[in-house]
Image (tube, helix red, strand yellow):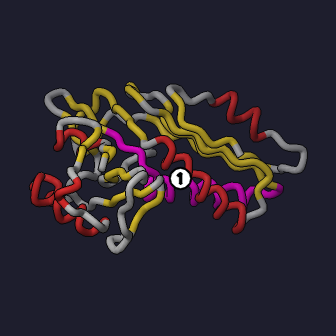
Amino acid sequence: MEILLFGITREIVGKSTLTVQQEEKLETVGQLKTWLGEQYPAMKKLSSLAVAVDSEYAEDTQTLAPGQEVALIPPVSGG
Amino acid sequence: MLIKIVEDVDLNEAYHYLQDPGAGGIDLFVGTVRDHAQGKQVVKLVFEAYAPMALNEMQKLAGAAQQQWPIAKLVMVHAVGEKMVGEPVVIIGVASAHRDAAFTACRFLIDELKKTVPIWKKEYYEDNSVWVNAHP
């Protein structure tokens, strides 16, 4: 699974796309968030961290499936 | 509706787009780069967007505004990239028959954009830089 990174999450990981291997068995958005916190403790220090699936904010219970576009959405600050 | 993400916002384009014979008022909000934040001197801002989702979220806000107020024309344009002090970075425009709706819808759109639209800004000071809102 490829995950698009923006803003501070891109800086935490050090690249703009993160590849997660299938062996990690991340089935839901919530599992992905937990895994990210374990791999990158700096993610846990953010004010919030949302996940978007196919350009829509996703709930933690949402199932991840192949072919979806997944992105991390750290606290937004447009305007 | 004129909704887009651009390198440089164009105020003239927005104003021309908003003109409408049925509109008695055009409300145009322009967000610009301020020279200070948290008591520090700001040198510049750098904006980035998750463009497809940002446009999607902006469309949703525009739709919500149109449901609530009688809007003749609507503009939401946000810039990305490096912006220096004084430069415009976002334009929200609403044309409506009466000014109340134009003011209220304009305020709604900029306030909600700041809450949900996936755009990020990094503030550069003399000595360091910070992603705005990233940490509590």
> What is the x, y in percent for residue B23?
84, 49
Nearer to the camera, B47 or A70: A70
The single residue placed furthest to the bottom in the displayed view is A61
Q: Quadrant of residue B13?
A: top right
Looking at the image, which residue is at 57% across and 60% down? B108
The single residue placed furthest to the right in the displayed view is B21
Q: Quadrant of residue B45?
A: top left
Q: Is residue B12 above or below residue A10?
A: above
> What is the x, y in percent for residue A63?
37, 68
Nearer to the camera, B76 or B30: B76
Q: Chain of mark 1?
A: B
Q: Is residue B101 above or below residue A16?
A: below
**In the shown orientation, is residue B23 left or right of residue B38?**
right
Nearer to the camera, B136 or B52: B52
> What is the x, y in percent for residue B2?
68, 41
Q: Quadrant of residue B96?
A: bottom right
Looking at the image, which residue is at 43% across and 43% down? B50
Q: Main secondary structure of the magenta part?
A: helix
For label 1, the residue is B110
Looking at the image, which residue is at 17% across and 42% down? A13
Residue neighbourhood size for the residue with mark 1, other residues' Cα within 10 Å, grouped as few (<14), some (14–19), many (≥20): many
> What is the x, y in percent for residue B27?
68, 47
Quadrant assignment for the C terminus of chain A: top left
Which amino acid, by three-letter code, is at mark 1?
A: Ile
Magenta-span inclusion, residue B103: yes
Query: Magenta part of the protein: which range?
Result: B97-121
The single residue placed furthest to the front in the displayed view is A23
